[in-house]
Image: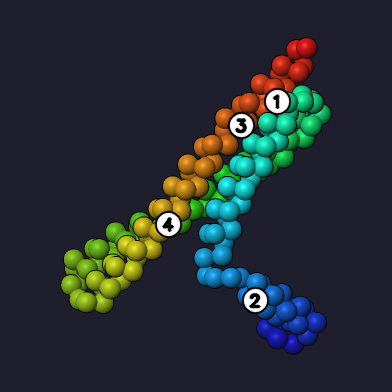
Amino acid sequence: MVAGLNFEMYLFLSARSRILRDNMPNPDFFVIFMKKALKTYLASVASELDALRAQPDAKRARRLLERHLAQVGAFQHERLIHLIVTLFFALLLLVSFAGTLIFPAWQFFLIDALVSITLLFYIKHYFFLENHVQKLYPITDELYRFLEAENNQ
């Protein structure tokens, strides 16, 4: 027994973590994945909207709207998590700056630099998420208008 787990569970978890580790192309896997997922989703929903405009179908529009609302929720959740992490790193930077002012040692300057660089990358990624999630709202409005027009006919 390893840390309260039976041997089969230990083998399963270690194999799963090995598969995850071996399939990550680089440390920024999840950041790259999220950017790619958001861009790919925007492109696919735009092509589906074009197909709906060309050949209106209320049933297909309803399915697209349901899937779209689920995707918007997932991307909004991702954005919220990154906002919380970004604010945490901003707070950490303020505490680090205060520590540097109180105890001006080279170790605190190093911590300030590391936290600042990390915060800059989080801010950049958060703004990417924010700007691209904002592009999803007009699509939602268009789908609702499309379904409303179909219901009025």
What residue appears at the point 22 percent right and 68 percent down from the top-left corner?
Answer: 100
* Residue 17 seen from this side: no
Q: Which residue is mark 1?
A: 53
Q: Position of residue 132 (x, y in %)?
A: 52, 42
Q: Are marks 2 and 4 in contact (CB under 8 Å)?
A: no
Q: Which residue is mark 3?
A: 139
- Badge 3 amino acid: Ile
| Crowd tier of the residue under label 1, counting other residues whose Cα lies within 10 Å: few below 14, some 14–19, many 20 or above | few
| Crowd tier of the residue under label 3, counting other residues whose Cα lies within 10 Å: few below 14, some 14–19, many 20 or above | some
Kindly report which numbered mark, 1 or 4, lies closer to the viewer in this rendering. 1
Question: What's the CA distance linking mark 3 and mark 4?
Answer: 27 Å
Counting residues from the start of the chain, the first of labels 1 and 4 encountered is: 1
Counting residues from the start of the chain, the first of labels 2 and 1 encountered is: 2
Counting residues from the start of the chain, the first of labels 2 and 3 encountered is: 2
Q: Position of residue 109 (x, y in %)?
A: 24, 71
- Badge 1 amino acid: Arg
Question: What's the CA distance linking mark 3 and mark 1?
Answer: 13 Å
